[in-house]
Amino acid sequence: MSESTESPRPPRVRVTAPRPGEALDLPGGDDERGPAATASRAPADAERLLVRSLMRSQLRVAIVSALGFVLALAAIGVLAALPALQSTLIAGVPAGWLVLGFAAFPPLVAVAGIATLAANRTEAQYRELTGADDSERGIP
């Protein structure tokens, strides 16, 4: 058997994202791109705070919307299980089945509309606080 002439492998390198507030250590540093590029890489503390606030607001809207829809769906399930609806027939189909089949859509549309309005309102507040214009981002 012939002996392998391969060189030993270099040690593995762990690549991770920079932690918030930690400066980026890029090859070349300030020399290649200049101090203005280095300053633009790290967003200001106020901007980070506003973005974090926007994300919390959007998460809150999403959670409240999801819980509202789950509660509405549970109420529809309880309504459909009422014995009076099970004994009532409409076109040969128990009314409870019709409630289950069609009553979920109006709350779904309502929750989606309310969630969209709330998300648009929080984004408008964020744009107002940052002074960002839709025209700056290419949005008509």
Image (spheres, grey):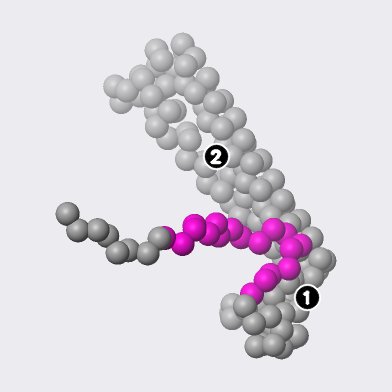
Q: Which residues are magenta?
A: 9-26
**Is 24 in the magenta?**
yes
Question: Magenta region's main secondary structure?
Answer: loop
**Nearer-the-camera pick, 84 or 69:** 69
Residue ID at (56%, 48%): 112
In the displayed structure image, the side of residue 115 where residue 129 appears, left or right: right
- Relative to 61, say whether 33 is above or below: below
**Is 110 in the magenta?**
no
Name the secondary structure under disc 1: loop
Residue ID at (69%, 63%): 123
Circle 1 residue: 131
Q: Residues within 10 Å of mark 2 (few under 14, many from 20)?
A: some
Q: Give, as a three-letter code, the residue at label 1.
A: Gly
Residue ID at (49%, 57%): 12
Residue 53 is drawn in which quadrant? bottom right
Marks 2 and 1, how far apart at CA: 35 Å
Query: Which of the numbered marks, if any, corresponds to residue 36?
Result: none
Residue 132 is drawn in which quadrant? bottom right
Q: Give, as a three-letter code, the residue at label 2.
A: Pro
| Residue 71: percent from left, percent from top | 59, 30
Q: Residues within 10 Å of mark 1 (few under 14, many from 20)?
A: few
Say which of marks 2 and 1 sits in front.
Answer: 1
Residue ID at (17%, 54%): 1
Q: How many marks?
A: 2
First in sequence: mark 2 or mark 1?
2
In the displayed structure image, the side of residue 12 where residue 67 appears, left or right: right
| Residue 34: percent from left, percent from top | 71, 88
Circle 2 residue: 107
